[in-house]
Image (cartoon, rainbow, N blue to C red):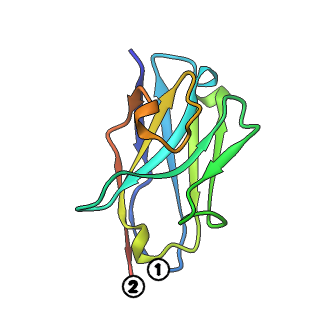
Amino acid sequence: QVELVESGGDWVQAGGSLRLSCTLSGGTLSSYVMGWFRQAQGKEREFVGAITWTGQRSYYGDSVKGRFTVSRDNAENTVYLQMNTLNTEDTAVYYCAADFYATEWYNPFEYDYWGQGTQVTVSS
């Protein structure tokens, strides 16, 4: 059974940076497209970024483009989300997700496996 565990969520001041990690167990990371999503209180789940199986391509939501970077280390079964120039609107629970064949990277319904989420809070 595939399990995803996120870590790295924290409180940070606006303008700061954080790096989230997501470790996959029960499978081989290189078999999966990996996505990051977030959900702020009272809002729908939002696409943050995705990365293809070997890391050759990555995709980003408009609100994070140029500030966030998704990367992966298949040898370590871990995917990362580097978040720079954080602002208060980035406050949310961040989730990683995995799927064999996701083509609509931005669509949460494409992903079969989800982590439990990690809280990121950005204060002004």
Sequence-first disc among 2 and 1: 1
Residue in the image at 42% along x and 20% along y: 2
The spot of residue 52 in percent (x, y) is 66, 34
Residue in the image at 49% along x and 34% along y: 23
In this picture, residue 43 sits left or right of residue 14 = left
Q: Nearer the viewer, residue 28 or 76?
A: 28
The spot of residue 34 in percent (x, y) is 55, 35
In this picture, residue 77 sits left or right of residue 55 = left
Tell me, for residue 124, which label it has, or none. Answer: 2
Q: Is residue 79 above or below residue 120?
A: above
Most extreme residue toward the left, as rendered?
A: 42
Tell me, for residue 64, which label it has, or none. Answer: none
The quarter of the displayed image where residue 114 is located:
top left
The spot of residue 62 in percent (x, y) is 57, 63
Tell me, for residue 14, which label it has, or none. Answer: 1
What element does badge 2 sit on? loop
